[in-house]
Amino acid sequence: MKIHPKKYATLLLFLLPLQAFAETALIAVATNFTPTMKAIVTAFEEDTPHRLQVSFASSGKLYAQIKNGAPFDLLLSADQAIPQRLIKEGNAMLNSQSTYAEGKLALWSNDNTLIDNQGAVLYSRHFHRIALANPKLAPYGLAATQVLAKLKLTKSTYPLWVQGENIGQTYQFVRSGNAEIGFVALSQIQIDHEIKEGSFWIVPHHLYDPIKQDLVVLKKGEGNPAISDFLDFLSSPKIQKLIESYGYTASLHSSS
């Protein structure tokens, strides 16, 4: 079928603006936010012409990659200190830092009966290994050490620690049975407000410092329409509800 030249020209005029504003962005994301971010990316790419390429790692590792020249446009960290440092060191845009979520810590086991709703297993000898993320690299690992310190269990549990490089590896230690219990992000075991499997204890907030997770626009991302559109999308009521369904307290609010 032949298309009339005038109709073809009209079609091109219609498509060009869409193509002109379609951009690709590279986003670095803390491991704990992996399932949530994957759901957000799917929704974003369905609703906009942009495409996102996402890398997941511990916040500390992502910081090192950025300092070594990794071409990311945006960082979603698991803490506030790293975005602050990147701004101070000239790698990120001034006034671009904001809290996108507050994380929650959970003690989790793949065994359906091992953990009760008070975390009493920590005082027992019913486990041989306890997994937690490296506290020097991962905020959730630091939070886990704070919990054990406040419960006066650091000394008795320390010989049993199995440290993951990030919270994703920590989850896998427990999931595979290499550790009977472990401190993970609630978001790793919760979807749509329901715990997927196993037994768990949602750790009370007063036992660890708030895990405020901040994002920051990196120098390379300045002026990228995909980044500005993504930030607007992230603060929309629909995505704020999605974030909360994965076990976070959502923190961004739409300006519209």
Image: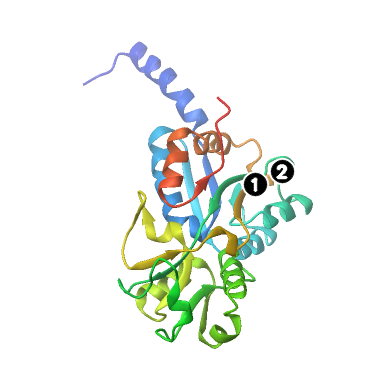
Q: Residue furthest left?
A: 1
Give the label on residue 93, or none: 2
State the separation of the CA atoms marked 2 and 1.
7 Å
Query: In what element is the residue under mark 1?
Result: strand
How many numbered markers are drawn?
2
Q: From the viewer's perspective, is 153 left or right of 50? A: right
Q: From the viewer's perspective, is 220 left or right of 189? A: right
Is tag 2's residue or tag 1's residue first in the polypeptide sequence? 2
Q: Position of residue 12 (x, y in %)?
A: 41, 21
Q: Position of residue 212 (x, y in %)?
A: 61, 52
Q: Amino acid at mark 1?
A: Val
Q: Mark 1 Cα within 10 Å, few/some/many (few <14, many 20+)?
A: many
Q: Position of residue 97 (x, y in %)?
A: 67, 44
Q: Is residue 62 visible?
A: yes
Q: Mark 2 Cα within 10 Å, few/some/many (few <14, many 20+)?
A: some
The residue to which callout 1 is attached is 216
Query: Residue at the location (64% across, 35% down)?
Result: 223
If the image is split into quadrants, where does the N terminus sit?
top left
Q: Amino acid at mark 2?
A: Met
Q: From the viewer's perspective, is 194 left or right of 49? A: left
The reply to whether discs 2 and 1 touch (Cβ–Cβ < 8 Å) is yes
Q: 169 and 248: which one is in front?
A: 248
Q: Is residue 72 visible?
A: no
Query: Residue at the location (39% across, 61% down)?
Result: 189
Q: Is residue 87 above or below residue 58?
A: above
Q: Quadrant of residue 117?
A: bottom left
If the image is split into quadrants, where does the C terminus sit?
top right
Q: 182 and 20: which one is in front?
A: 182
Query: In what element is the residue under mark 2?
Result: loop
Q: Position of residue 68 (x, y in %)?
A: 68, 62
Query: Residue at the location (63% across, 62% down)?
Result: 65
Q: Quadrant of residue 159?
A: bottom right
